[in-house]
Image (cartoon, rainbow, N blue to C red):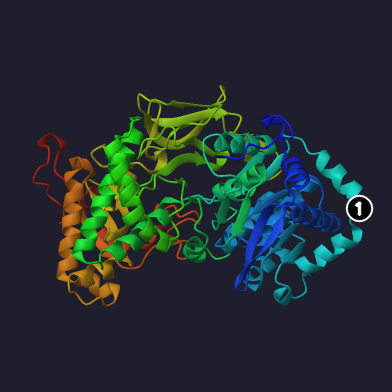
Amino acid sequence: MTMKLRLPGRPEELTIPALLARNAAEHGALPALSWREGDGWTTLDWTEVRRKVAVLASGYAALGIERGEHVLIMMGNRPEHWLTDLALVHLGAVPVTVYGTSAPEQIAHIARHSRARVAVLEGAGELARWEPLLADAQVPLERLVVAEAGEAGPHRTYGSLHASGARTHRPEDFEKAWRETRPEDPLTVVYTSGTTGDPKGVRLTHRNIMLQAVRIDGRTDLPEHAEHICYLPFAHIAERILGIYLPLLRAAHVRLVADPAAVGAAVRELHPVQFFGVPRVWEKLAASVRAVLAQLPAAQRESIEAANDLARARAGHRERGERIPAALEASYGRAKEQVLDPLLGLAGLDRLVWTASATAPMPIDVVRFWAGWGITIMDAWGLTETSGVCTINSPDGFRLGSVGRPIEGLELRLAEDGEILTRGATVFAGYLRPDGSVESAHDADGWFPTGDVGRLDEDGFLWLTDRKKELIITSNGKNVSPALVENTVKEHPLIGQALVHGDGRSYLVALLVLDGEVAPAWAAARGIEAGPLAGLAEHPAVREEIAAAVAAANARLNRTEQIKRYRLLTEEWGPASGELTPSLKLRRRVVREKYGALIDALYADPYEDPHADPYEGPHEDPHRAGEQ
């Protein structure tokens, strides 16, 4: 179960430095931080972590960093990043991590808006985007610190800063500085990546974050000192909570994975007991498993499917709060041991006791898929502005497809239009202004409008519908949730990604992306030569299957929600190409602009729906009205 540690104060009084002091004093020999070096792992225990943090804090102080000052960081998940973050916090400074995929204009906006004088970077790839800002009169940036010494050029290196700290470190100054930190002081500023517009600076305090960590800890059930595989960017609130703040609370062990693409290899090696992934990660993992299953003999697939059915039946009883029948439990135990665990072990997933997701609605077919392997994904929901989680499923209460119930101390209510409003001590005070003050985002009663739309069921579980600002309003005045339609059509494994369009139009069209992992395996299983994806997308069997998938999805949707026309694409969308945010959310505006000609082509001819309501008028494209 979760480690029950002595807290160095009441939850609302905790600070990050107080937790690190406790860990070094009471759990100093436990492993705290590991990272890959060569063929093995290098590990620091909690005593060593605090010693390095103290030296680094002295180095940053010698650089002129002062209490309350913002310092920007752009590095991957490497020890220099993690330790710098804590060192700055111990000085009373405010670390601000910037996504490594940020475009130069986004970097310039954050540097200007945050008023930071110093940025700590990884290497040459980051320098190319940051160096021009040193000469920009509108940007206060004065100095760059570079982790990769061989790529630093004329700039200060992380190693020299650490050496400077070792020479100037005075323990009494370090202890005095962190003890001056108050729970209401800012701990970090997280710039929301956003699906449109400039990033906004969300200021979060020690109290916001500590209460969040304590309440999440109370809703999970983990073995003592469980390892966390840390691979998502620290610019994302989820990884800041899971990869920095919760491990400090739990005196747990963080395994840094510098390359997110290597997370699968890390999981296979480490066999973790907990794993967090955004929905796209779980979708890709499911696609990989399905691709392998497609290659297996029919008899073996039938055995696996029978085991999947037992696991889902067992999950259904747990979901409903029912006692699991003894016969089912026994059958599942045998299937788990003989069928599921050996296969899960190949992927390193056989020891999982806690799995979670957040940031966007999880497609229900993906949730059900993993339930069939005995893996119950505890979906959660929250925002950067709410310090992370607002609602969460937990082992003692979950509904697959929902995002759970509110954490302790957080209130939820729904506005008339279904928008979710929230208030509580984990909700931020407001957005950072360029002058350093904070602009409130709450109404007069303290409610924060989240921009998400949902419903609460009779048991208090929250079900997300969509983003309020992303609702499609057709030319007939009907509201459509694009996420609902997209997740429904993506239930077919051949469709990896989807975007539905139809705002101001009389019907919906879609861009569908062929799944690059599943499609070749699907084709091979049917005797189709698995050539390039572009060729597969044109194959009659693939086209027929996609058409059937769209028809099946439409059969489950109301007429306004149905996809009337679509185009199949073969290039996966991602952060590097701009269609996804760094946290893997769909940037609808970017996709619409990039594929505007294809979308327009889908509306090139009027579409007559044979099932149209005669009282709604003809389904003619309003943008082509009057054309001959």
Residue drawn at (86%, 48%), measured in percent from left and top? 174
Please state the horizontal and vertical placement of residue 235, each as a whole percent of the image.
Answer: 59, 53
- Relative to 398, say whether 608 is above or below: below
When asked about the image quadrant of residue 25, the answer is top right
Q: Three-letter amino acid code at disc 1?
A: Arg
Nearest the camera: 105 or 557?
Answer: 557
Residue drawn at (67%, 34%), measured in percent from left and top? 207
Work out which residue is located at the far left of the displayed protein and give it.
610
- What SS does tag 1 mark? loop
Rendered-image quadrant of the C terminus: bottom left
Whether residue 237 is visible, yes or no, is yes
222 with respect to 181 (left or right)? left
Please state the horizontal and vertical placement of residue 306, each as a whole percent of the image.
Answer: 23, 51
Please state the horizontal and vertical placement of residue 576, each as a whole percent of the image.
Answer: 48, 65
Please state the horizontal and vertical placement of residue 136, each as a whole percent of the image.
Answer: 70, 63
197 with respect to 627 (left or right)? right
Nearest the camera: 592 or 177?
Answer: 177
Nearest the camera: 173 or 482?
Answer: 173
- How many numbered circles does the render carry? 1
152 with respect to 386 (left or right)? right
Q: Which residue is mark 1?
A: 170
When asked about the image quadrant of residue 444, the answer is top right
Rendered-image quadrant of the N terminus: top right
Nearest the camera: 213 or 151?
Answer: 213
Judge the density around disc 1: few (<14), some (14-19), many (≥20) Cα neighbours within 10 Å: few
341 with respect to 237 (left or right)? left
Residue drawn at (26%, 37%), measured in percent from left and top? 478
- Relative to 455, say whether 64 is above or below: below
Residue drawn at (27%, 58%), measured in percent from left and top? 493
Whether residue 604 is visible, yes or no, is no
